[in-house]
Image (cartoon, helix red, strand yellow):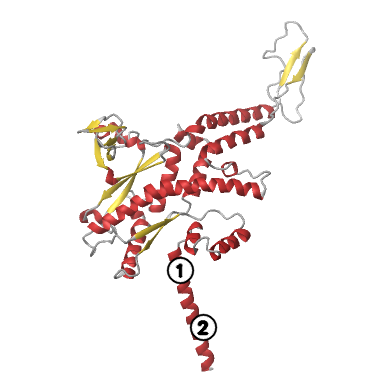
Amino acid sequence: LARDFVRNRALATRAVSVISTNVVGTGITPSVSLPKDYKGADSLKADIELAIKKHLMSTALDSGGAHNLYGFQSLAAKTLVTDGELFLRRRWRNNQYRGKLALPFQMEALEADHLDEIKTSYGGNEVINGVEISPIGSIVAYHLKLVHPGASLSFRKKAFETERVPAADILHIRRLDRPGQLRGVSWFAPVMLSLGELSDYQEAEILKQKMAALLAGVIESDLEGDVAGDDALGIDDLAPGAMVSLKPGQKVAFTSPPKVDSYESFMRGGARSIAIGLGITYESLSGDLTGVNFSGGRLGRMDMNRNVSEWQNQILIAQLCEGVERWFVEAWNIDTTRAGVLPDALDMTWTPPRPPVIDPAKEIPAAIKEIEAGLTSRSRKQRELGLDPEKIHKERLEDLVRDVEITNATTKKELER
């Protein structure tokens, strides 16, 4: 039902877009750091960054060739809102099928429909809705259908076949709202009824508006037994400047179309209720900024930013990004084309996109004062703004070197003169 809403209801489509663009935006970016005293740190770091660029930031990461890492992040955010969960499966590639892949694995996105919800056990383990649980309560595997039930291939034999995939090869992305929860729930669940009724009301009001725009004429007759027939001069359609002739005793009475009242206020109230249930602001959902002042808009945005930060750190980074980081390290360490393994000292940090700055003239100086007062570090503040401190530091050094080179060249020319 949520998928149908997203396809056919404007507010549902807008809600998915708002959450996805705020949580992922241009992408949650990785940055790599190694201890300065680690032997060959600079060279190894350069190799890792090159592999990230060629593999994670390339559509080569996707077994279907459509998404890079940022694309998977965006897909996960959208699917979380609609379905409540998404599965990312690791596909190992050996040298025969590896091709030009920088690392020997790819990722495949799977909808929750692939789970085999019929199976109840495997060996001594319990299987709940396709999720295999060990006796100590840990997830050890997922039982997945080989073909999506809605695909054209589902009518073939493979539709009834399932595969047991170890949990190490699956990233199960979902929001956990209660202890012991295994599966995700659509974020539209608390607002589904309101969203449907509001859309139905809007369609009814549109029909009402169409009726209000119509002008219909009704022929009234004072003659007893007078029934309009083929020979009567009735009114089928009115046209501008039309001259109408009626029989003696007949007259035209016009209908009174219904009036459309309270539509705007009712739609605003309904949209506010939906925005509250989804954890976003009414202004972001509707695009309506009527009557919003700076303080009110900023307070609402700050509250939404806290929700966005929670979704970024507890779902996208903790479940998706760190899972991809683990797969990256494992693929690097088993890759026979690479010498050595990645050290435990490797630190991969994930930086979410920059939240919107409402008033740069005030917020940027405030951030500078926080750094100067020792309340935060420059690197942390840069990350809060969605920037990579390592990249900024490198670019600043490059700018400094370039400025020195230009200055020296200019000075040399002046001396030669």
- Amino acid marked by disc 1: His
- Amino acid marked by disc 2: Thr
Q: Quadrant of the C terminus?
A: bottom right
Q: Earlier in the sequence, mark 1 or mark 2?
A: 1
Residue 198: quarter of image: top right
Rendered position, 368 above or below 23:
below
Which residue, as the protein is rendered here, is positioned at the far top?
A: 224
Spot occupied by residue 61 in the image (x, y as percentages of width and height)? 33, 53
- Which residue sits at x=34%, y=50%? 323
Q: Which of the numbered marks, if any, corresponds to residue 14? A: none
Q: Nearer the viewer, residue 8 or 167?
A: 167
Residues at marks 1 and 2, CA–CA distance in whole angstroms: 21 Å
Res 75 visible? no
Q: Are marks 1 and 2 in contact (CB under 8 Å)?
A: no
Residue 58: quarter of image: bottom left
Q: Which residue is mark 2?
A: 407
Q: Which residue is mark 1?
A: 393
- Which residue sits at x=63%, y=43%? 288
Q: Nearer the viewer, residue 80 or 66?
A: 80
Spot occupied by residue 39 in the image (x, y as percentages of width and height)? 29, 70
Spot occupied by residue 383 in the image (x, y as percentages of width and height)? 47, 59
Count neighbours of disc 1 (C-alpha within 10 A) and say few if under 14, some if 14 to 19, many if 20 or more.
few
Which residue, as the protein is rendered here, is positioned at the far front?
A: 374
Tag 1 secondary structure: helix
- Which residue sits at x=67%, y=14%? 230
Residue 108 falls left or right of residue 10: left
Rendered position, 51 above or below 223:
below
Q: Quadrant of the N terminus?
A: top left
Residue 392 falls left or right of residue 159: right
- Which residue sits at x=45%, y=73%? 398
Spot occupied by residue 143 in the image (x, y as percentages of width and height)? 27, 37
Residue 291: quarter of image: top right
